[in-house]
């Protein structure tokens, strides 16, 4: 089972986005977002919600409860 760390990285990379671009969506810095992808910091709920809206996916997918985005 993939962790949210793997999933948020894959979502970004599959869409050819940079960490800086996603950090701007979240209202944070690239360094903070990088720590989320490395698992050094836990991602706050507000950022999970923002990513769900941005990628138009469910939180179940990001949290690893669903196998696919749809």
Image (tube, rainbow, N blue to C red):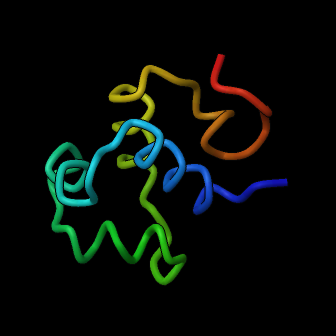
Where residue 29 sits, quadrant-wise, is bottom left
**45 on left or right of 34:** right
Task: Please say if 1 is above or below 60.
Answer: below
What residue is shown at x 54% (from left), y 49% (from top)?
A: 10
In-front residue for pair 64/13:
13
In-front residue for pair 45/25:
25
Image location of residue 26, percent across then percent down: 23, 49
- Of all residues shown, which one is farthest toward the top? 70
Task: Please say if 39 is above or below 59.
Answer: below
**46 on left or right of 23:** right
In-front residue for pair 18/41:
18
Where residue 23 sits, quadrant-wise, is bottom left
Task: Please say if 55 is above or below 41.
Answer: above
Image location of residue 17, percent across then percent down: 29, 45
- Of all residues shown, which one is farthest toward the bottom? 40
Tag count in the figure? 0
**2 on left or right of 55:** right
Instruction: Classify the position of the C terminus by image quarter.
Output: top right
What residue is shown at x 41% (from left), y 28% (from top)?
A: 55
What residue is shown at x 42% (from left), y 59% (from top)?
A: 44
Instruction: Classify the position of the N terminus by image quarter.
Output: bottom right
**19 on left or right of 67:** left
What residue is shown at x 39% (from left), y 38% (from top)?
A: 51
Image location of residue 60, percent across then percent down: 68, 33
Image location of residue 46, percent across then percent down: 36, 46
In-front residue for pair 45/2:
2
């Amino acid at each position: 089972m993939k962790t949210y760390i793997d999933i948020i990285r894959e979502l970004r990379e599959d869409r050819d986005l940079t960490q800086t671009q996603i950090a701007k969506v979240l209202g944070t810095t690239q360094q903070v977002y990088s720590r989320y992808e490395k698992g050094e910091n836990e991602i706050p709920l507000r950022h999970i919600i923002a990513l769900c809206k941005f990628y138009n996916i469910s939180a179940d997918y990001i949290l690893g409860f669903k196998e696919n985005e749809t």
